[in-house]
Structure formats: C-alpha cells, structure tokens
Amino acid sequence: MTKNKFRLITRSDFDGLVCAVLLKHLDLIDDIKFVHPKDMQDRSIDVTENDITTNLPYV
C-alpha cells in the first residue's frame, strides 16, 4: 500500500492491540512500542514524525 512504514506507539490493552492489528493489516507499521500513558505525559518517550500514536495522551 505505502512504502513508508511507521512505528506504532500505543498502550498494551485491548484497544491498543486492535489498533496494532488493523495498522499491521494495512501494512502501515513495521514496529510496535507499548508504553504507559504516564510515560507520554512525562515526555519520556521520543515521538517523531515516523510514529503513530493511538489510545494515548496527545504529545
């Protein structure tokens, strides 16, 4: 579908897993990073333009 692959950053709950399955099925992601929402709020996770975040606070 697209040659640019992204990294998915999401929670390790059911919603995050469903997002991972759907995005993997669409061939949009090549890596998945499960994080805690507090880590996102504390900005301890480096987010780049090649990342997709789901089910997490906005950064």
Image (cartoon, rainbow, N blue to C red):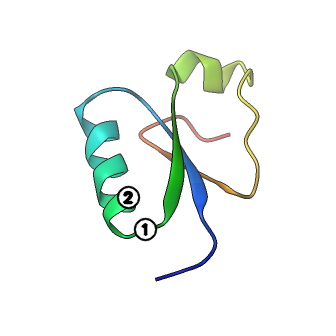
Given residues 7 and 40, the one toward you in this image is 7
Query: Residue beneath label 1, please?
Result: 27
Q: Residue furthest bottom?
A: 1
Image location (x, y in percent) of residue 1: 46, 83
Given residues 5 and 8, the one toward you in this image is 5
Badge 2 element? helix
Classify mark 2: residues with Cα within 10 Å, few (<14), some (14-19) or many (20+): some
Q: Is residue 50 depicted above or below 37 in this figure?
A: below
The residue depicted at 62 percent of the width and 18 percent of the height is 39
Classify mark 1: residues with Cα within 10 Å, few (<14), some (14-19) or many (20+): some
Given residues 29 and 44, the one toward you in this image is 29
| Mark 1 and mark 2 residues within 8 Å of each other at the beta carbon | yes
Q: Amino acid at mark 1?
A: Asp
Instruction: Say which quadrant the C terminus sits in.
Output: top right
Q: CA distance from mark 1 to mark 2?
A: 5 Å
Image location (x, y in percent) of residue 56: 49, 35
Badge 1 element? loop
The residue depicted at 41 percent of the width and 39 percent of the height is 55
Residue 24's tag is 2
Which quarter of the figure has residue 58?
top right
The residue depicted at 29 percent of the width and 52 percent of the height is 21
Q: Amino acid at mark 2?
A: Lys
